[in-house]
Image (cartoon, rainbow, N blue to C red):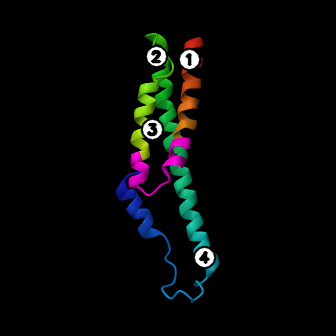
Amino acid sequence: MASAELLLVSRTMPQQPQHPTAPPAEPDRVLAAFRKSIDNIDAALIHILAERFRITQAVGQYKAKVTLPPADPDREARQIARLRKLSEDADLDPEFSEKFLRFIIDEVIRHHERAQQG
């Protein structure tokens, strides 16, 4: 998601009351608004992952056609390092990001191996 989109999401999220001891106004509505934002982000993640896998499927078919190996450890290492840095910049746990990316990479490699088998 682009930074402008993230800014839009953060601006549309409900704000908590300013006074720390004051109870939230209509907590069920506040919680519902947070959950709606989470649901929207989850939907965006699914669509982004679907698009990513459509592209990596094409990569797998291409690799099979030109007889390239299913995995590219050098690229994987560069991607992990790049995304760890992005995670740090975004205040997201880099360990979590690496685990998440490794899960995706492993699935992509499995698809590429399947493409090579025909």
Please give the residue where the numbered disc 4 appears in the rendered image: 29
Q: Give the number of the disc on residue 93.
A: none
Which quarter of the figure has residue 9?
A: bottom left
Marks 2 and 1 in Cβ contact (< 8 Å) = yes
Q: CA distance from mark 3 to mark 2?
A: 21 Å
Compare marks 3 and 2 and give the one earlier in the sequence.
2
Q: Give the number of the disc on residue 115.
A: 1
- Frontmost of labels 3 and 2 is 3
Q: Is residue 118 visible?
A: no
Q: CA distance from mark 3 to mark 4?
A: 39 Å
39 left or right of 8 in image: right
Please give the residue where the numbered disc 2 appears in the rendered image: 63
Please give the residue where the numbered disc 3 appears in the rendered image: 80
Q: Residue at x 58, y 75 (%)?
A: 30
**Location of residue 70 in the rendering, given as x and y in whole percent from the top left corner:** 51, 19
Compare marks 3 and 4 and give the one earlier in the sequence.
4
Dot 3: within a 10 Å radius of its alpha carbon, few (fewer than 14), some, or many (20 or more) residues? some
Residue 77 or residue 63, whichever sits in front? 77
Mark 3: amino acid? Ile
